[in-house]
Image: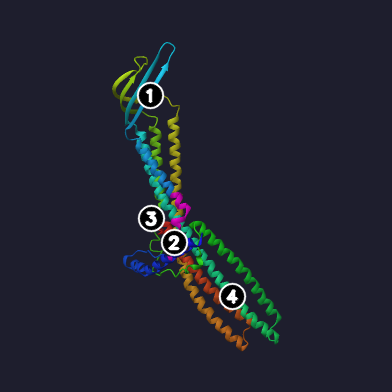
Amino acid sequence: MNIMNANHLNQKILMVLLVGCWLLPFSIWASDSMNVEPVQDTSLQALFLLGLENSPTITFAVAQQNAALNNQKIADSFLKPEVSFQSELSYAWMEKQSYARTASQLQASYPLYQPDREDRSSIASYQLSERRLQLEETKQALGLKISNLYFNYWIQKSEQEFLQKEFESISEIMMQVKQRFTIGYQDLNDISDIQARLDSNRADLIRIEQNLRITEIDLEAALGVEIDLSKFPPPSILPAHINLLSHQNDFAGLVEQHPALLRYEQMLFASRKQMEYEKNKDGVVVQAFGAIVNNQSDGYFYDDAQGAKVGLKLSVPLYLAGRTSAATAKARAESNQVSALKRQQELLLTASLQNAVESSQHNQKRLSALKDVLESNKQALTAAENGLSTGNRNILDLLDAQRNVHRAERDITIVINRLWNNWYLYQWSQGEIPVS
C-alpha cells in the first residue's frame, strides 16, 4: 500500500469512528425507547466497511450471485418463442448436370408442452435466491471473523499492558533492592528471585508481541487490506441494558431467519424441483412451429419449395433403459443431503446462541466479581507499602501486591472484550450482525 492510499484509508477510518462515536448515545437512547438493541462497537463498524469493500470472500460471493442471475435469464429464455434463419447460396458441379441453388428458411417454434423447461426456470430462480442468501451469509461470517480477531487483539493487548506494568514495577524494585543490598539491608537471594521474574517477564512480552502481530496479519487477510489497530481506541464497556437472556427459552425460534437456514430452504426447493425436472426432461414434448421457405435449384434438389408451413412436433421417448428413474433417485438423495445439512446448521446456530447467552451471563458475574477483586488488591497493595516501611512486609510482598493489582486490571479488560465477543456471537447466531 503506498503512502497516499494509506493516508486516504486512515482518513476514512477516522471519519467512521467520529461519526460512530457521535451517534452512539442516540443509538443507546433508541434502544431504550423502542425496545431494540442496535448497540455496536463503533471501531468495529469501520472494519466491517473495509471488509465489505476489500474482502475477496465478498467479491467471490457477489460474482456467484451474478452468475446465478444470468443463469436464470438463460433458463427463462427457453420458455419463450425461438426464431432462427438459415440461408444457403451454392453452385454444384455434378457428373451429369451442374446447377445453382438457393435455400432460405425463416423458422419459429414455441413450446406448447415441455414441463422440463419450466422446471429449469424454477430451479434457476431458487438458485438465484440461494446465492443472494449466500452473500448475506458470507457477510455474517466475515463479520463474526472480524469481530473475533478484533476483540482477541484487545485481549492480547491487555496482556501486553499487564506485562509492561509488571516490567516497570519489577525494574523499579530491582533498583531499590540493589541499593539496599549495597548497604546490607537486602539478601542476595532476593535479587536472584527478582531477576528471574524480570527475565520471565521479558520472554512473555516477546511472546505476546508475536501474538499481536499474528492477529493483526490474520485480520488484514480477512479484510483484504492493511490495517493498523494501534490507532483504534479500545472497546468500551458493553452497555448494561443489553440483555441476552430475554429469549433464552426460544433459541430455535431466534435462529429461523438466519441467512444460512434460509439458503438451505432455497436449496431444498431447488432439489425438489430437480426431481420433477428429471422426470419431465425425457417425457412427452409438444412444440408448435412455423416456417417461411424459399428453396430453388430448378428442380435439381429434393426440397425445392416456396411458401410457408405450420404444424406441431410431437416427441415421445419409448425406451431409456432406466435413465429417468436413476436420475430421479439421484436428485432425491441430493435433496435428503440438503435437508440433513439444514438440520445440522440449525443445531449449530442454536448451540452458538446458547453459548453466547451462557457465556455472557457468567462473564457479567465475573466482571462484577473482578471489580471487587481490584478494590481488594488495591487495599492489599496499600497494606504492603505500609508494611514495608514498618518492616512487617518485605520487598517481594510489595512486588506480589503490585502484580495482583495489575492482573485484576488486565482480567477486567479481558472480560469486557469477551462480553463484546458474546454479543457479536449472539447476533451472528441470528444473522443480525450489522455488517452493511
Q: Nearer the viewer, mark 4 or mark 1?
A: 1
The residues tagged by marks 2 and 1 sit, at their Cα atoms, a distance apart of 68 Å
Going by the numbered disc 1, the residue's amino acid type is Glu
Q: For numbered disc 4, what is the local secondary structure?
A: helix
> Considering only order in the chain, which callout, 1 or 4, is on the residue closer to the N terminus?
1
Quarter containing the C terminus:
bottom left
Q: Is residue 42 magenta?
A: yes
Q: Nearer the viewer, mark 4 or mark 2?
A: 4
Residue marked by disc 3: 253
Find residue 166 and name its label: 4
Residue marked by disc 2: 424
Q: Which residues are magenta?
A: 41-61
Mark 4 touches mark 3? (CB < 8 Å): no
The chosen color scheme is rainbow
Residue 14 sits in which quadrant? Answer: bottom left
Residue 415 is left or right of residue 104, and the answer is right
> Considering only order in the chain, which callout, 3 or 4, is on the residue closer to the N terminus?
4
Mark 4 touches mark 1? (CB < 8 Å): no
Q: Nearer the viewer, mark 2 or mark 1?
A: 1
Mark 3 touches mark 2? (CB < 8 Å): no
Q: Residues within 10 Å of mark 4 (few under 14, many from 20)?
A: many
Residue marked by disc 1: 88
Q: Nearer the viewer, mark 3 or mark 2?
A: 2
Residue 413 in sight in this render:
yes
The residues tagged by marks 4 and 3 sit, at their Cα atoms, a distance apart of 48 Å
Above-or-below relation of 42 to 109:
below
Q: For numbered disc 2, what is the local secondary structure?
A: helix
Residue at (39, 25) in percent of width and height: 317
Q: Residues within 10 Å of mark 1 (few under 14, many from 20)?
A: few
Going by the numbered disc 4, the residue's amino acid type is Glu
